[in-house]
Amino acid sequence: MSTTSPLEQVPTLANDLLRVEEQLQSAVATDNELLQDIAAHLISAGGKRVRPGFCITASAAASQDFTPTELDVILGAVAVELVHQGSLYHDDVMDSAETRRTVESVNSKWGNHQAILAGDFLLGRASEIAASLGVEVAGLLASTISQLCDGQVRELEYVYRIDRTEESYLKSIDGKTASLLAAACRIGGIVGGIERDRIDHLTTFGRAYGMAFQVIDDILDLTATDEELGKPAGNDMIEGVYTLPVIRAMAHGEVGPSLQQLLGRPIDTTARDEARELVRSSGALKSAHADARRYADQANDALRSFADTAGGSALKAAADHLVDKVEKLIV
C-alpha cells in the first residue's frame, strides 16, 4: 500500500507538521510520568498525520500561496489528531489488539484500564485546546467525539449479525471515519477565517473524502493480500464486522444463502477465504466500487469554489489521488 501523503504537494506542510509534532508532545506533558509515557506512546510511533494535514491545508483553501501556518491552525490540527489518537487507544482495547503502527499496543503493554484512561486523557487534552480556539471549535470537536462513539457503537451492535443493513453500515462509517475528517477541514476553515459558505464546502469535502476512504478500505480488506494491507486480509469478517460488499453479497439471490451460512459466528481462515470468494463472485465488490467512486466525485465537486487557490488545488489533488485509488481497485 502507498505510504505517501495525499497532500505531499503542499510545500509548507512538512514544516507545519513538525510544529504539530512538537505541540502534540507538549499536549501530553504531565508530571505523572507513567501517564505521559502511555499518552505519548502512539504519538511517538509516528503516522501520516492525515487529519492535521487536512486541517492545515483547509485553512489555506482561500489563499493564493502557501505560507507558514498560524499557531491557532496548528493547535486546531493538534486537537483533531489527539481525538484520533484517543479513539485508537479505545479501539485497541475493544479489539484486543496487540500491535499498532508496528509497535506494541498500549493495552498490550500497560493493560486495558491504563489504555482507556490514557485515551480519555487525550480526549480531554483535545477539548482543552479546542476551547482555547473558541466556543464554535469546542462545540464542533465535542460533537465529533459523540459521532465517533455513535459510529463505533453502531458497528458493535451488528458484530456477527447477518442482518446488518446498509443504512447501519453507512451511519457507522460516517461517524467513526468521515466525521473526524469533516471536522478537520471545518476547523481549518473556521480558524483560517474562510467565508462561512465556503467552510460548508470544505466540510462536505472532508465528509465525502472520509466516506470514500472507508469504502475503499473495506473493499481492499476483501481483495488485497496480507502484504499489501500490512495486516491479515479478510480480518473484518473474522471479527464479525460485515462491510458494504459483504452486506450486498449476503443479499444476492444465488450467493447470499451460502454466505449467510458461513457467517454469523466466529470463523477460521479457511471459512474466511471461502467467504471472500463468495463475495467476489456476487458482483458486490463492483457495486461498492461504484459507491466509493461516487463519494470521491462528491469530494471533488465540493471544491469547485476553490478551483483557483493554492489550498483548494492541494485538496483537489488529494481528491484526485482518491479517485485514482478507486480506479486501481481490482474488483
Image (cartoon, helix red, strand yellow):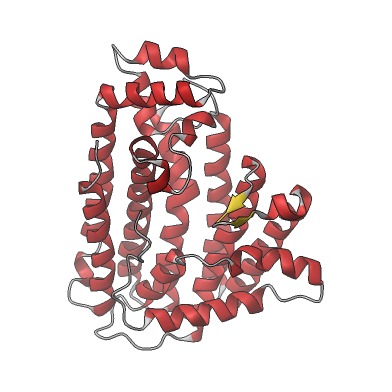
Residue at (57, 66) in percent of width and height:
45
Asked which quadrant contains residue 28, the reply is bottom right
Give the camera-side residue of 128 and 225. Answer: 225
Q: Is residue 219 above or below residue 64?
A: above
* Rendered location of residue 320, percent (x, y): 22, 60
Figure check: 276 above or below 36: above
In the rendered image, residue 217, in percent from the top left (x then y), is placed at 38, 45
Q: What's the residue at 42%, 85% (across, down)?
A: 69
Residue 215 lies in what quarter of the image? top left
On the rendered structure, is 174 left or right of 64? Answer: right
Image side of residue 264 versus residue 305, left or right: right
Q: Where's the C terminus, which quadrant?
A: top left
- Depth check: 60 or 95 in front? 95
In the displayed orientation, state which residue is furthest to the front: 227
- Image quadrant assignment for residue 160: top right
Figure check: 260 above or below 39:
above
Residue 323 position within the rendered picture, expressed as x and y whole percent measured from the top left: 23, 53
* Count of picture labels: 0
Give the residue displayed 23% in from the left and 33% down from the top. 286
Q: Position of residue 306 (x, y in %)?
A: 23, 71
Q: Nearer the viewer, residue 226 or 147?
A: 226
Horizontal side of 176 relative to 117 (left or right) equals: left
